């Protein structure tokens, strides 16, 4: 047996992966580790953002000898356009997820597949949006709020409703910079319009629109995704779970949920607990059914039901390589097409469910709010019946598992900290005790650690290394997405063990509040929770968001969504530290706008810092937090 007293190291995780890669070799399966080798070195033009193929006169690649494309566009226009398109892709993706959630809310009914689990939150949002709530049936209200939310995507006039949640000063900055997002779809399509051949090539205009498209995600589509997921499935509260591949159980039917939209995974979780399905599992020789997750879907069901987290982005092939996965059930985003051919090397069923994410070598079970129950049950049944096809000789579940306490929504954070400080509770709690801790220096500040894995960074090493460094320096970490799972896998969300890594101040706060030093705030759309937390802190403190000793960090990011997030986090006034360059280094003008003293910094009081040396990245974050403290005179 493993010694559970220690945290799990990167080396242990790598050793486990290596045993799984041996299985891959045995069965002739392809893995990302191999494909990275085939793709390296990457194209230098692509990496620096200096290739343009938005019209068929190209592709045009910028070199010293060929400083302009055929239309005459210079390198700054090309890099800026690529950056905006990257952002728009991410904003579209997050926001479309939010739209699906609005549609699910619209489908709720008493006794239906989907119901309203947090009516108080629904009423709160309805009031915020000026929708009459008195004497209304909760489902009529849900439909009205959902429809109002859906109209945010295409409304002809005005700006996003949720912008009013930000401090006045932030709203003013957005207004003056002309980056307040209007209809969500408009910002995405205008970004494509601006980057069409023969439109914008002025870097400043392209970067302003990048911030605006990002804001339409973080303060629009993602925020609706988060808020209405809470209304539908419950607002997360602290709950104990476990993380890493060892959560899969050898004697059970293992169903792995992967993707993003909780509408699917919630239903799978429900039917996996159905006595009829459990009896069926026993009848085929299994002891029971284990659901575990990868990527953001995992975060969603962990936060609300304590479903264990098998791993993050670069672990998705590993769950199949255990040989013990009866089905990997996916919806949208961050799903490797590799899962198709890989699952064919095992008995695993690769089940796709969304018309948005169709993949070869998968079984497609079309999922919709109307047939959710029926289809979820059919999927669970398929997995259970597949148990008998497992080859026991191929089963290898690495013995890695850590305890994690997850579920820190803004509401939950306020509640646990208010409880400690015994402060005057307002209706929903306040951030004042947290502000007190930072003001007095017990905590030096906070880092929002978010984002993916990327083979360009040794998987999870940057997340875990940076988190440990922050904790030692009394900087509390809030985490989401695959960064959160990295922490959980290592043990940094174990409220008993992880505090031993902290400086004295943070350790005391953890002990008093019974919290781990890394707080799990959810999936990537839930970074909108972090924006609300930052806004509330600034308001409770009476300062601007940019003055709060808090920074954002995505050390291993890879997706377009992550760039969209970076744009809205910076636009909200939070300095954002990246460990991977966003294909912008080919233009010093674009780089200066994003990272310099007089670009986005002048408009929104924050900027990006890109540093691929992770040790230095950590030092810069601490420096930034300390500089903010010094400026406040604390
Ligand atoms: O939205 S952190 S790899 S799973 S993109 Fe994807 Fe990145 Fe993971 Fe969730 Ni976010
Ligand atoms: Fe080349 Fe200009 Fe066409 Fe881009 S838009 S491919 S730079 S000609």
Image (cartoon, rainbow, N blue to C red):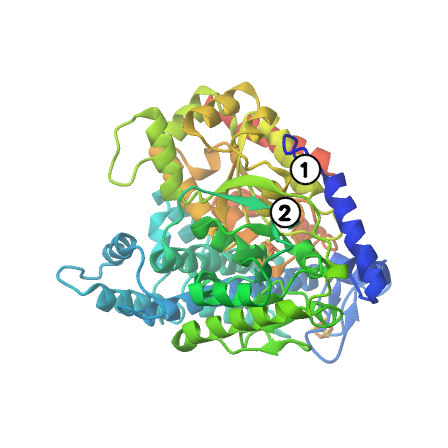
Q: Element type at marker 1?
A: loop
Residue at image x 34%, y 36%? Answer: 415
The mark nearer the N terminus, 1 or 2, is 1
Q: Nearer the viewer, residue 352 or 261?
A: 352
Quadrant of residue 206 in the image? bottom right
Instruction: Classify mark 2: residues with Cα within 10 Å, few (<14), some (14-19) or many (20+).
Output: many
Report the image quarter containing ligand 1.
bottom right
Q: Nearer the viewer, residue 466 or 157?
A: 466
Is residue 395 left or right of 305 when viewed as pictured?
right
Q: Is residue 326 visible?
A: yes
Instruction: Classify mark 1: residues with Cα within 10 Å, few (<14), some (14-19) or many (20+).
Output: many
Residue 8: image tag? 1
Query: Are the residues flagged by discs 1 and 2 in contact, CB closer than 8 Å?
Result: yes
Q: Nearer the viewer, residue 116 or 131?
A: 116
Q: Position of residue 459 (x, y in %)?
A: 72, 47
Residue under label 2: 244
């Amino acid at each position: 047996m493993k010694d559970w007293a220690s945290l799990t190291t990167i080396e242990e995780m790598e050793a486990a992966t290596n045993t799984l890669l041996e299985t891959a070799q045995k069965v002739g399966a392809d893995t990302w580790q191999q494909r990275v080798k085939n793709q390296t070195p990457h194209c230098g033009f692509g990496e620096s953002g200096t290739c343009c193929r938005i019209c068929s006169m190209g592709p045009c690649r910028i070199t010293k000898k060929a400083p302009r494309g055929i239309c005459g566009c210079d390198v700054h226009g090309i890099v800026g356009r690529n950056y905006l398109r990257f952002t728009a892709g991410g904003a579209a993706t997050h926001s479309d997820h939010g739209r699906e959630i609005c549609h699910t809310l619209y489908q709720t009914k008493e006794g239906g597949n989907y119901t309203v689990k947090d009516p108080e939150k629904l009423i709160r949002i309805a009031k915020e949006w000026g929708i009459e709530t008195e004497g209304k049936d909760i489902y009529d209200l849900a439909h009205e709020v959902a429809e109002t939310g859906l109209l945010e995507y295409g409304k002809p006039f005005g700006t996003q409703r949720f912008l009013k949640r930000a401090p006045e000063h932030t709203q003013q900055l957005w207004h003056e910079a002309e980056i307040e997002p209007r209809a969500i779809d408009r910002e995405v399509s205008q970004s494509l319009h601006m980057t069409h051949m023969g439109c914008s090539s002025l870097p400043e205009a392209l970067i302003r629109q990048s911030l605006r498209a990002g804001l339409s995600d973080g303060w629009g589509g993602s925020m609706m995704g988060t808020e209405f997921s809470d209304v539908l499935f419950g607002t997360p509260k602290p709950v104990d779970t476990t993380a890493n591949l060892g959560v899969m159980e050898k004697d059970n039917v293992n169903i792995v949920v992967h993707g993003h939209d909780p509408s699917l995974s919630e239903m799978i979780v429900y039917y996996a607990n159905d006595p009829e399905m459990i009896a069926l599992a026993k009848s085929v020789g299994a002891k029971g059914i284990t659901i575990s997750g990868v990527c953001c879907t995992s975060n969603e069901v962990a936060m609300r039901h304590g479903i264990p987290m098998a791993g993050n982005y670069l672990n998705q092939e590993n769950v199949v390589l255990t040989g013990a996965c009866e089905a990997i059930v996916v919806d949208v985003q961050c799903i490797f097409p590799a899962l198709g051919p890989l699952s064919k090397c095992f008995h695993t069923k690769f089940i796709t469910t969304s018309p948005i994410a169709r993949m070869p070598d998968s079984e497609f079970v079309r999922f919709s709010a109307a047939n959710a129950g029926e289809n979820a049950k059919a999927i669970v049944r398929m997995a259970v019946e597949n148990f008998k096809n497992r080859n026991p000789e191929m089963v290898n579940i690495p013995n890695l598992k850590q305890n994690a306490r997850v579920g820190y929504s803004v509401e939950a954070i306020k509640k646990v900290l208010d409880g400690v400080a015994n402060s005057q509770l307002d209706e929903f709690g306040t951030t004042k005790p947290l502000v007190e801790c930072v003001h007095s220096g017990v905590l030096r500040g906070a880092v929002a650690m978010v984002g993916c894995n990327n083979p360009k960074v040794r998987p999870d090493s940057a997340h875990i290394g940076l988190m440990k460094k922050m904790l030692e320096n009394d900087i509390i970490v809030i985490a989401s997405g695959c960064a959160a799972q990295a922490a959980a896998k290592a043990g940094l969300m174990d409220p008993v063990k992880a505090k031993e890594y902290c400086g004295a101040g943070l350790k005391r706060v953890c002990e008093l509040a019974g919290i781990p030093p890394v707080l799990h705030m959810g999936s990537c759309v839930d970074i909108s929770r972090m924006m609300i937390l930052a806004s509330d802190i600034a308001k409770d403190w009476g300062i601007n968001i940019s003055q709060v000793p808090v920074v954002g960090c995505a050390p291993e990011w890879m997706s377009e969504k992550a760039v969209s997030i970076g744009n809205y986090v910076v636009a909200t006034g939070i300095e954002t530290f990246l460990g991977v360059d966003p294909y912008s280094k080919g233009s010093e003008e674009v780089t200066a706008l994003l990272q310099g003293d007089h670009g986005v910094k002048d408009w929104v009081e924050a900027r990006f810092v890109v540093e691929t040396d992770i040790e230095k990245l950590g030092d810069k974050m601490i420096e930034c937090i300390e500089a903010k403290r010094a400026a406040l005179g604390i």
